[in-house]
């Protein structure tokens, strides 16, 4: 019994130590910033959060790209508003099995956090967007936007040179999921993907943002 107790105590100590290191990484990564904020550039984008997950929201048509040529609107039941396109990367199981927080399962959360897992891109077309507490407006140059476009495109897994839709899994008539590259785990979260997208364009953000606050607090 004493030996079992020692093993349990040791495992608990290791867990607390790991949690402490993870929190330190989270705090340091979000406290140190990189990039800069521009206020008079050509392209207006937004970064939005639901409190856990973040997306980049981009104008559908600019001189740099027409997103409809990369993500066809024929994939969407509702094509009435095509001003902005919101794109996010994340754990495939979490995305597809958890349309609302009520449906979150412990097994889904544990798998997403502790085991490298397949990923998906969530894409939603929308009308004109406005700045809010959970949606920050950013302006960037055309050159910076082109770098961001390349980063975002490279995250999609292509099939026959086209984005690979995951059929009948969207939450509504204006969104869909697509197969994505790379694995999700607790050190590479959906917010790290957004963080990297912003860094590719030189936008001010946390140097390593595991959670939304490490991104949004720099965009006010």
Image (cartoon, helix red, strand yellow):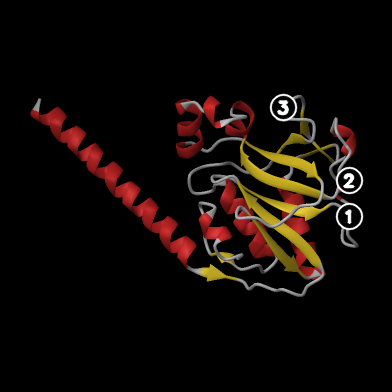
**Image check: 142 left or right of 119?**
right
Q: Is 31 situated above or below 85?
A: below
Say which element carries label 3.
loop
Can you tell which quarter of the image residue 44 is in? bottom right
- Name the residue beneath numbered marker 2: 68
Q: Is 179 situated above or below 46?
A: above
Q: Position of residue 208 (x, y in %)?
A: 52, 60
Label annotation for residue 207: none
Taking the spot 61% from the left edge, 41% from the top edge, the residue there is 90
Say which element carries label 2.
helix
Q: Position of residue 129 (x, y in %)?
A: 76, 52
Taking the spot 89% from the left edge, 52% from the top edge, the residue there is 66
Other residues around mark 2 within 10 Å, as few (<14) / some (14–19) / many (≥20) = some
For marks 3 and 1, the one nearer the N-term is 1
- Name the residue beneath numbered marker 1: 61
- Quarter of the picture containing the C terminus is bottom right
Contact between marks 1 and 2 (CB within 8 A): the answer is yes
Label annotation for residue 169: 3
């Amino acid at each position: 019994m004493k030996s079992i107790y020692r093993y349990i105590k040791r495992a608990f100590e290791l867990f607390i130590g790991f949690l402490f290191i993870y929190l330190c990484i989270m705090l340091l990564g979000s406290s140190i910033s990189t990039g800069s904020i521009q206020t008079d550039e050509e392209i207006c984008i937004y970064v939005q959060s639901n409190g856990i997950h973040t997306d980049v929201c981009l104008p559908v048509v600019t001189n740099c790209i027409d997103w409809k040529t990369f993500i066809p609107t024929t994939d969407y039941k509702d094509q009435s508003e095509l001003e902005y396109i919101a794109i996010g990367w994340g754990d495939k199981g979490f995305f597809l099995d958890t349309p609302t927080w009520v449906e979150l399962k412990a097994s889904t959360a544990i798998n997403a956090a502790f085991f490298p897992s397949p990923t998906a891109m969530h894409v939603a077309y929308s009308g004109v967007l406005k700045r809010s507490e959970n949606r920050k407006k950013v302006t960037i140059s055309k050159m910076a936007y082109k770098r961001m476009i390349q980063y975002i495109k490279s995250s999609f897994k292509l099939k026959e040179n086209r984005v690979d839709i995951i059929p009948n899994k969207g939450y509504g008539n204006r969104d869909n999921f697509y197969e994505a590259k790379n694995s999700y785990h607790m050190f590479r979260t959906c917010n790290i993907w957004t963080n990297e997208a912003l860094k590719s364009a030189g936008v001010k953000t946390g140097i390593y943002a595991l959670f939304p606050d490490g991104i949004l607090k720099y965009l006010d």
